[in-house]
């Protein structure tokens, strides 16, 4: 699996923190990371350990989000509800978990921290997801096999790894 960041987050601190967390996930856990730069706001990316591409929000939406049945099953909203606001695509700042075939299996629907959003938003933000899997074994993603979890498991159903 690959973690894909749709850059750049509107808030510079979120963008920089996302880059640091992706670097940690790559260096510590050996997780492949990549960036689709759809809204370049914060200067060039240097020393990023994964691939960096420049795409439009429309290209990302068509390739990753639109008509994605796997994604429809793992997020609360449809992709059009989650990423289109008032007719405009709002993808920048989010994170996606992409399988080996290139299909997005999960995506954050809120780019920043849960602070300022309604209760329960922590499971939907890019930053909360990245911090969860970067700082400890996660109950949302098995870092041993990179399988998505539903949060209720005591062990990974894919590889059998015990979870915290």
Image: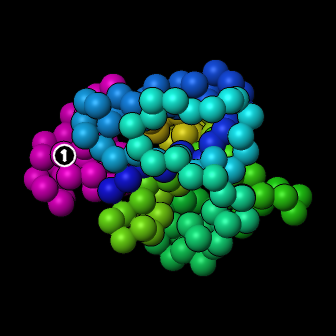
Q: How is the image coloured?
A: rainbow
Judged left or right of residue 79, residue 29 is: left
> Which quadrant of the structure image shows residue 48?
top left
At x 53%, y 24%, the residue is 17
**Which quarter shows the C terminus?**
top left
Image height check: is 48 above or below 60?
A: above
Q: Is residue 155 magenta?
A: yes
What crowding class fits label 1: few (fewer than 14 Cα within 10 Å), some (14-19), or many (20 or more)? some
Q: Which residue occupies 62% across, 27% down?
A: 14
Tag 1 residue:
144
Towards the viewer: 35 or 91: 35
Residue at the spot 29% in from the left edge and 31% down from the top edge: 27
Residue 110 in view in this figure = no
58 or 150: nearer the eye?
58
In the rendering, at what x and y percent does residue 98 appear? Answer: 42, 59
- Residue 20 x %, y %: 46, 25
Task: State whether residue 50 is above or below residue 78.
Answer: above
Q: Which residues are magenta?
A: 135-164
The foreground one among 32 and 138 is 32
Q: Secondary structure at mark 1?
A: loop
Outermost residue toward the right in this view = 86
What secondary structure is the stretch in magenta mostly built from?
Answer: loop
């Amino acid at each position: 699996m690959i973690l894909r960041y749709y850059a750049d987050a509107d808030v510079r601190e979120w963008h920089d923190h996302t880059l640091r967390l992706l670097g940690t996930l790559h260096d510590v856990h050996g997780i492949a990371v990549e960036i689709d730069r759809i809204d370049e706001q914060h200067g060039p990316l240097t020393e990023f350990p994964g691939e960096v591409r420049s795409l439009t929000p429309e290209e990302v939406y068509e390739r990753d989000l639109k008509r994605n049945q796997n994604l429809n099953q793992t997020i609360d909203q449809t992709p059009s509800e989650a990423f289109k606001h008032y007719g405009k695509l709002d993808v920048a700042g989010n994170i996606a978990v992409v399988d080996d075939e290139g299909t997005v299996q999960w995506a954050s629907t809120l780019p920043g921290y849960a602070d300022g959003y309604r209760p329960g938003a922590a499971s939907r933000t890019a930053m909360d997801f990245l911090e969860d899997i970067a700082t400890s074994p996660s109950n949302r993603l098995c870092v041993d096999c990179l399988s998505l979890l539903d949060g209720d498991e005591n062990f990974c159903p894919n590889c059998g790894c015990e979870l915290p």
